Amino acid sequence: MSENRMTPPAEGQEKDVLLVLDKQQGKVSAVKGFDKEGNLQTVPPIQGGEFMQVDRNGDIISNLVANFYRKFQDTEGLALFRCKASEVEQNAKAIEDNHRNPTPEGDKQVETLRVPKPDNPESKQGYRFDPAKIDWESLKKVGITADTLKNTKDFDRVMRGYKSRNTYTVSGTIGGFYLKPTDVKLSFYQAKDGTIVPKLHGVQQDEKLLQRPYNGHEFTKQEQGNLQAIGNLGNIAQIKDPKSGGKIPVFISRDRHTHELEYMRADKWKCPDSVCGVKVSPEQKAAFEAGQAVRMENLQFKDGTRRSAYLQVSAVERGLEFLPRSAVQALQQGQLPTQQVAGVKDEKGVEFNGHVQPGAQGKSPDKVQPKDVTPAAESRTQVAVNTEGKTNEATKQTQEPLKQGQDKPTAKQKEKQEKTQDKALKADKPKKSRGLKR
């Protein structure tokens, strides 16, 4: 039995029913109520069913919606709608049908039923940090206030754990040190004792930053050019995890204002199904996941216009970003990041990684042939030995194919190789004469 059932409105009043779309299942249900723990209770949206009905213009429904979004802060998988009780079946079907096969007419009808998220501090944003726990007085001493961040629309962003988009000129005494006027970006992090600490990101002036290893990864000339001209690496890099010490796949980007390098786990990022109303194709999704820039057509923007744009995963933005004009110009001038592939097999059937050659750029990963690929640095020896039949001093006696990333025999292969050599030497050694028999 529901613990949060609503009393039906008086006769003659307009009645509304709340509908919930589970985006993953593509199924619409009617809200019956909430239990003691605040869990949502639903029933099939059948005419005359036992579902909650509320006044269309009453405060109860506003409070209910606010509580819904407060309880279910991660509502990416749910969508809330409202309609007349007498139209519950046809509206539920219309929502489901448009979710499966969206059309302009269907979108327009569904939007008239959608319940927007309420604009209140608790339910909006899903902040990572509590603004009340931040020492704003210390920040004020160097020239940054909460109002400053709100005026530049950076407040919500930094509260969610991101770095500010804008730079701020700071100066003053902080921690006993005088900070001369300088431009910085702002972010926050939580210290071990639980306090929220501001972090000022100044402009990096080190011109040789990209020439040095970054968490164990050495940038190629192409990668250095991509980071400088475009802002993103253009492929997936393997770096040393600062916490575990193991290798992890990451996107790497360079902040266009502060020149800081940042990384984001590639195996943790999920590509969205659509961007600005346009579905992301499997080929585009694969390119995004490989760190490449992708041109998308006919995107629907908030001002009502439709335009094309280049997008790419940015570690600074923690997801897809629209590339700025300067980056697009770099792409159009031929500085497009090379397409990366993994899992291509050499002549011995061993997988290797590499870069798609210019003539084969744009092919989907499953259609790229070994001849289209230039082996990555860690796979060059493997392909040279297994496919091209080349050898060096370390591999010339090896009969078994090299494994991925291998550039010399393993201990087991070396032992087998030495035994084979010893056997060959014994076979070639002339037998000692025992003299002539009489």
Image (cartoon, rainbow, N blue to C red):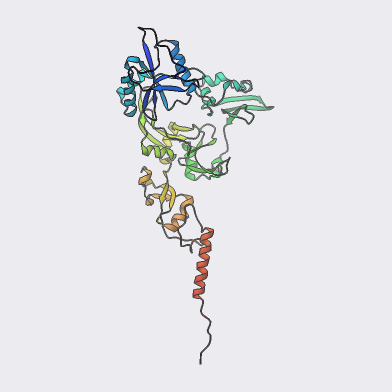
Dividing the picture into quarters, in which one does residue 50 lie?
top left
Image coordinates for residue 198, horizontal then vertical, percent: 60, 27
Taking the spot 36% from the left edge, 28% from the top edge, the residue there is 26
Image coordinates for residue 82, horizontal then vertical, percent: 38, 17
Taking the spot 59% from the left edge, 22% from the top edge, the residue there is 144
On the rendered image, what quadrant is the N terminus found in?
Answer: top left
Q: Nearer the viewer, residue 201 or 275?
A: 275
Image check: 357 left or right of 264?
left
Image coordinates for residue 417, horizontal then vertical, percent: 51, 64
Q: Nearer the viewer, residue 1 or 427?
A: 1
Taking the spot 48% from the left edge, 62% from the top edge, the residue there is 398
Image check: 56 left or right of 137?
left
Can you name the residue that lies furthest to the front here?
1
Image check: 160 left or right of 386?
right
- Vertical relation: 379 (above or below) 70: below
- Residue 332: in sight, yes or no? no
